Image: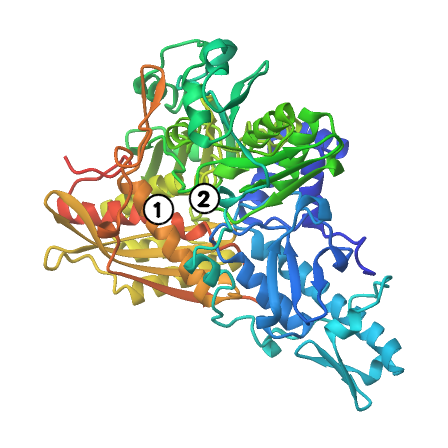
Amino acid sequence: MAAKNKISRRKFIVRSLLGGTGILVGAAYLGRYSLRRSLYQELNSGESPYLGSTGDPMIWFEISTDNIITLYSPKVEMGQGTFTSLAQITADELDVNIEQIRVQHAASISGNLDEFSTGGSTSVNSLWQPLRELSATMREMIKNEAAKKMGLSVDQLTTKNATVTGGGKSMTYGEVVTGVDTWEIPDTPPLRNIKDYKYVGKHIPRVDLQDKVYGEPIFGMDAKMPDMLYGSVVRSSLIGAKFKGADISKAEGMPGVVKVVLEDDFVGVVANTYMEAENAKLAIKANWETEKNWQTKDIEDMIKVGKGEPVTIQTEGDAEKYLSDESTITAEYFSPLGAHAQMEPNGAVAYVEKDKATIIMSTQVVKITRGEVAARLGLDDDQVNIIPTFLGGGFGRRLHTPNAVQAAVLSKAVGKPVKCYFNRKEEFQNDTFRPPTHHIMKGRLSDDGMITAIEHNVSSGDVMYGSALLPNLIQNVIGSDLGAWRGGMIQYGAIPNYRAISWRVKLPFATSWWRSLGLLANTFAIESFMDQLALKAGKNPIDFRLAHIQDDEAGKRLKKVIEAAAENGNYNEQVKDGIAKGFACSTDASTPAAHVVEVSIEDNEIKVHKVTCVIDPGFAVNPDQVKAQCEGSIIMGMSAAMFERMYVEDGALRPTIYGPYKMAMMKHAPKEIDVIILESGDKPGPVGEPPLGPIGAAIANAVFRLTGKRLNAMPLELA
């Protein structure tokens, strides 16, 4: 495409970050603090561009002779509905019926790889423009070839329903592509007006619905290869345990064992069946070295504000000056360690041959996984083919994939395909957890009940740091963990003095990406405190928030979302028939969302009856899917806010199974979730995570109206 070498300013910023250019590194340290805060604001409000190849439509599309078009997606489908939205975009610009579109995951060997992985609510948002351009260009390529075969000029041809027509002749796309070996890529033609789209903006049924309803083998757990064996890896239940070796003598002679593989960093078994591998694993006596017998209290003490490394991520005016006397209002908030608890455990099927490796697995990071496997096996990247599957839940858990390396090592040792998966206990204990947090909020009110100054201190374990997604050099440039403070900035820009400070704490176990990152915990603290300040000022919480929002573009969108939520949720301060309403809002990656919840207390437990959610995603490619994402975020947020919590007992993480690890069940779901979509642009914004932010605070604010008690810790529990 003619414009493929051009690059936007935002894409340059992100690519420079990922590439670690010397210019940016130098600039970051020359004007370290002011430049970093500008960068934080950009990262907080911006959206990630697509960073894969968009210069060759041939690695994106395959057109068969029966006129079926396959789109190979570099983004993985983990239940969020991405494949359906991408099919809609493709169908409209490629000029085909959506029934003719098939969407498949792009294997790494295809070259269609995303540098950023799948996460951050960026799949549809980042591919919106590139996929439209690719589809339009592919349509033009087909017309050019059709013109040659039909003996006509391109100007004489039109396309519709995967058919090229002109001069009294017609050819299907499948007929046009037959026999064509070399394709010329023309300039990208003008894109069609969104108003003329047939599928985009409409409620289209999910393209993956039938496979899931009928239980087709589409998930990583379903993967098989001919002559496949089973592997099982020994993993310690203790925090920070370092592998020091193992006695494998007993396991080697057990039934079904093909080989016990002893490496410097792990030991595993390959056997004929899964149970034989698991049984032999139990007979291995592994030696582990640990530093400390950790307990929950140790972690809670570590996470307190003031004990980590502080970085000011946002500042305006002089908040410190106005928050240093007895008139300062202070509140603390806490959130616990949480698991991903996705249904499908991590694992892979690997086959390592002499000069190549094939891995079938559920992963959010295809390119990174390929690189890790290649490095371990001493292969080139293009000798490793990662074949992604549908994910049985992701939520950030599959942004870490060392299990692929282990499966590959086991396969290489026996020369056959090996399927190797975590059991449920191992999945819980080896998770990359949602970090615990501690927040201190400070505020000051003027005589007329307006906020003079506000400050948010958040202490958290790592989210971005330690992740395979971002190398150490980039971490040093950024200077703070943007995942931990996501949603932690003050969104009320009309307050004259405000600042936000992030405190980084390095915990003794892995914490990392979890759906919405720090958004849930940070919004819980800020929006609970805003509710407290509004009541102390004697103001209506809705009007109070509106009065403190700037009148810029982002502020106007947030105001409209708040007003629509209050109106549609019929927000008021009354307690009627034992039911109270609570409100909260947040803006995440430029997408504002607000919730009104209706809550009662029954048998000393919190019960959520209804949630009214208003979201402004810019533009909704598939409104039904946007609603589904909001519903999913709300339920997941409710589960985390009301039930979920991991403990540390005698050096191990607990619980290790569902049940003891409490989660929201069907009986806890609201009878009604009313989602209202406001559209303020012609480009889709992030959707998958923004609606998760406000739910915890909204519930807590409703509980305060029922009990007069401010719940300041998740999971929300009544005394």
For disc 1, the marked residue is 637
Q: Position of residue 311 (x, y in %)?
A: 51, 28
The residue under the point 53% across, 46% down is 120
- Asked whether 282 or 266 is in front, the reply is 282
Kindly give the residue lying farthest to the bottom in the view shown: 168
State which tag comes first along the sequence, 1 or 2.
Answer: 2
The residue under the point 73% across, 50% down is 53
Q: Quadrant of residue 262?
A: top right
Task: Look at the image and tell me whether residue 538 can be seen.
Answer: no
Relative to 666, is 42 on the left or the right?
A: right
Q: Is residue 64 above or below residue 372?
A: below
Mark 2 Cα shell of 10 Å, populated few (<14), some (14-19), many (≥20): many
For disc 2, the marked residue is 516
The colouring scheme, among rainbow, by chain, secondary structure or one colour, is rainbow
Q: Position of residue 111 (x, y in %)?
A: 73, 47
Q: Are the two marked residues, 1 and 2, in contact with CB atoms closer than 8 angstroms?
A: yes
The residue under the point 53% across, 62% down is 84
Task: Look at the image and tell me whether residue 367 can be seen.
Answer: yes
Identify the image quadrant of the N terminus: bottom right
Identify the image quadrant of the C terminus: top left
The residue under the point 55% across, 47% down is 389
- Asked whether 570 or 537 is in front, the reply is 570
Q: Secondary structure at mark 2?
A: loop
Q: Is residue 231 above or below residue 261?
A: below
Q: Amino acid at mark 2?
A: Ser
Mark 1 Cα shell of 10 Å, populated few (<14), some (14-19), many (≥20): many
Q: Amino acid at mark 1?
A: Gly
Relative to 354, is 389 on the left or the right?
A: left
Q: Position of residue 282 (x, y in %)?
A: 41, 18
Q: Quadrant of residue 353?
A: top right
Q: Position of residue 382 (x, y in %)?
A: 75, 38
